[in-house]
């Protein structure tokens, strides 16, 4: 369709590729990327863009910090917990000011970074062992195991014997 002699085009994101970001920890974290900016080849008011965020996340974990200014910044609305949800799929919509309005869409995947927020938990609450008094040095006495819900180095468990 033509408007005032100009061909109307929809806003487009760079290369039309999915974008990504990462966040972790407390609410209010900010995520920004040049990939979040759309361009509209239309002229004048028709090229003015407003951004909107869509998600299948029922808890509305993310929001736009500003919907009509640059840079486009996503922010976390609540603390994120990687152990519960390790990634979020969002859609960033760029809507132009023309009539009818045209929309470009960018798929965004946000990976939740792990923080050391889990405590190691032993498989049993009590381990009982006995060893003969004449057992040779370095005789295994008991095997204990603990797991930590964190990821990578944050989830590695080390052990130490202490006297009480």
Image (cartoon, grey):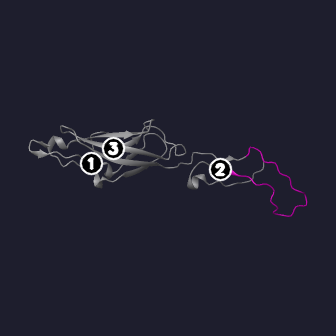
Quarter of the image that includes the N terminus? top left
Residue 6 visible somewhere in the drawing = yes
Q: Residue 105 shows which numbered tag?
A: none
Q: Which residue is mark 2?
A: 147
- Distance (Cα) linking label 2 and label 1: 45 Å
Question: In the shown orientation, is residue 69 left or right of residue 160?
Answer: left
- Distance (Cα) linking label 1 and label 3: 10 Å
Q: Which residues are magenta?
A: 124-146
Q: Residues within 10 Å of mark 3 (few under 14, many from 20)?
A: many
The kind of secondary structure the magenta stretch mainly shows is loop
Mark 2 vs 1, N-terminal side = 1
Question: x and y percent of residue 66 in the render?
Answer: 31, 39
Q: Residues within 10 Å of mark 2 (few under 14, many from 20)?
A: some
Q: Which residue is mark 3?
A: 92
Tell me the residue at 27%/48% (across/down).
38
Q: Report the residue that reaches farthest toward the left.
A: 5
Question: x and y percent of residue 95 in the render?
Answer: 25, 41
Residue 129 magenta-drawn? Answer: yes
Image vertical order of residue 46 relative to residue 131, above or below: above
Question: In the shown orientation, is residue 111 left or right of residue 122?
Answer: left
Mark 2 vs 3, N-terminal side = 3
Mark 2–mark 1 contact, CB under 8 Å?
Answer: no
Where residue 5 sits, quadrant-wise, is: top left
Question: In the shown orientation, is residue 110 left or right of residue 115?
Answer: left
Question: x and y percent of residue 100 in the render?
Answer: 19, 37
Q: Residue 38 shows which numbered tag?
A: 1
């Amino acid at each position: 369709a033509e408007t005032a002699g100009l061909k109307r085009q929809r806003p487009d994101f760079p290369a039309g590729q999915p974008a990504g970001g990462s966040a972790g920890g407390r609410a209010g974290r900010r995520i920004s990327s040049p990939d979040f900016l759309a361009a509209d080849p239309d002229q004048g008011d028709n090229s003015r863009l407003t951004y909107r965020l869509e998600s299948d996340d029922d808890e509305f974990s993310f929001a736009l910090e500003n919907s009509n200014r640059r840079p486009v910044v996503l922010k976390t609305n609540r603390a994120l917990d990687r152990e519960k949800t390790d990634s979020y799929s969002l859609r960033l919509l760029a809507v132009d000011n023309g009539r009818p309005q045209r929309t470009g869409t960018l798929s965004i995947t946000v990976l939740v970074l792990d923080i050391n927020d889990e405590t190691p938990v032993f498989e049993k609450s009590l381990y009982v062992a006995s060893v003969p008094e004449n057992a040779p040095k370095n005789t295994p006495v008991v095997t204990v195991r603990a797991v930590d819900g964190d990821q990578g180095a944050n989830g590695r468990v080390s052990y130490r014997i202490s006297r009480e």
